[in-house]
Amino acid sequence: MAAYFDFLSKILFDTFVFLVFLMAIYNVKFSQIAKRLPPLLLLTLPVSLIATVTDSMLIFTLITYIYCFVFYSLVFRYPPMKIITGYAITLIIMTILNLIQMVVIMQFTDNPFTNTSTYITEAMAFIIAILLYKFGHMDKLYDALIVKNQVSRNIILAVFALMVSMVLYQRISPKDFMNIFMTFLFIVILILILYSGMYKNYMSLRESRKQLQSYEQYLPIIEDLIDQVRMRQHDYNNELQAISMLPISYTDYDSLAAALSNELDTSCNDHVIKNSYLLRINMKLIAGFLFSKMNLAQEHNINLDIDVKNSTLTSKAAEFELLDVMSILVDNAFDATEDGGMIKVIIDSDGKTTTVETFNAGLQLTAEMRKNFFAKGYSTKPLKDGAYSRGIGLYKLKQLTSKYHGEILLDNQTVDGQNCIHFVVSI
């Protein structure tokens, strides 16, 4: 009977230690799961009974893993993979903490595996779990390692699988534990080395894919502009011939001047010729994007003024990343501008960085709005149903700018007597 209660107390303690870790990882408050716990904790009774009556540590370990999966699945009610990944991170952290504590305990005793040292280790783990729950932001760690990064997720799952396999093997052959433990460490180090190389290749491939998508989207637009300019060259030959014939048709000065002015106005206001200067920009993705926005502005009767002060753009960021910066700023201006409105874009480069400046009509910014403008999820753009869109563009803009140690300026400026929101981004 004493053995039963010994197993029961240990299982309950381990359950709560892992529970606090998982609450920290999933960012779940205790009040959200408190009502589910009492009936689920009854599962520890049969598990403790099996541990008491069985002679096979392998069977007991397998049942313990099944119990953990079922218990935490019912407590948090998340999909199986989220439970497994959360448990994997917790087990890895617990193992590291136990190894550190074991090294410390060995400084004071030759046998670190006594009941007293075990309880001390578990109590310290519980205290650390509570501290991480309160102050550790473990949910951000989970988001970075599992949700946003497929490579690190695979590494964690691979290490978790090896740890479980090592424990199961130790239950089968306890005498070979040190050998299998050293083998486990070697395999983990090998996996980390291999995955570090794979991660670099993965990031390089992802950037190449983004760049390819950008080229596929905007190169046809700039090619279309080139084709239109070539077609207009033939028309201009005819127009020049017509202009040369004007003195024959109009013999007096006033009528000749009026006819010549009319011809020149028609030529200068031609949409294709007005925008042909974009072809001088050295980054063709940027040129294609700007031409597409000029076409969009024409469709919506928006006065889009693009001033490219330096056609040779240079930046630490890749071309597709600079395109992301520009598209976020310009798209944001379009979203805030009604048909018939005005948008001004200034693009310049000093040989090291590229500066993108946008003006669009908007409200007067308060200090609180400036503070929240770049926060993830913050937006002032209403949707059709009256709800507000979930702002991620400016949050991404801040991340891209920070990545290359750039600068962002946000303020209000007056343009032609109109209050405008003014962005300046140097990257």
Image (cartoon, helix red, strand yellow):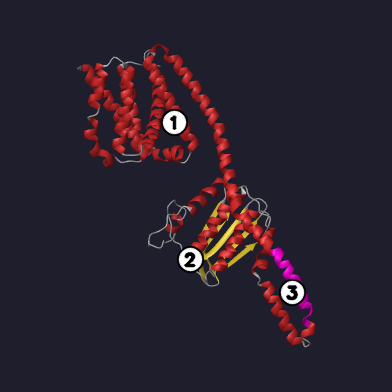
Tag shown at residue 157: 1
Q: CA distance from mark 2 to mark 3?
A: 43 Å
Classify mark 1: helix, strand or loop: helix
Q: Which residue is mark 2?
A: 362
Please give the range of residues in magenta.
229-246
Answer above or below: position of 145 versus 268: above
Across and down, in percent, residue 301 comes to 54, 70
Across and down, in percent, residue 186 comes to 50, 21
Answer above or below: position of 332 versus 122: below
Quadrant of res 53: top left
Between marks 1 and 2 in the image, the one whose residue lies nearer the viewer: 1
Q: CA distance from mark 3 to mark 1?
A: 70 Å
- 3 or 1: tag closer to the N-terminus: 1
* Cβ atoms under marks 1 and 2 closer than 8 Å: no
Q: Which amino acid type is shown beneath numbered disc 1? A: Leu
Classify mark 3: helix, strand or loop: helix
- Using the rendered image of the protein, determine whether residue 104 is visible from the camera's viewpoint: no
* Cβ atoms under marks 2 and 3 closer than 8 Å: no
The residue at the point 29 percent across, 14 percent down is: 55
Q: Nearer the viewer, residue 309 or 341?
A: 341
Circle 3 packing at 10 Å, graded few (<14), some (14-19), many (20+), is some
Across and down, in percent, residue 278 comes to 66, 61
Quadrant of res 425: bottom right
Classify mark 2: helix, strand or loop: loop
Which secondary structure dominates the residues rendered in magenta? helix
Answer above or below: position of 160 versus 301: above
Across and down, in percent, residue 76 comes to 31, 38
* Cβ atoms under marks 3 and 1 closer than 8 Å: no
Give the total of numbered labels: 3
Q: Which residue is mark 3?
A: 239
Q: Is residue 423 magenta?
A: no
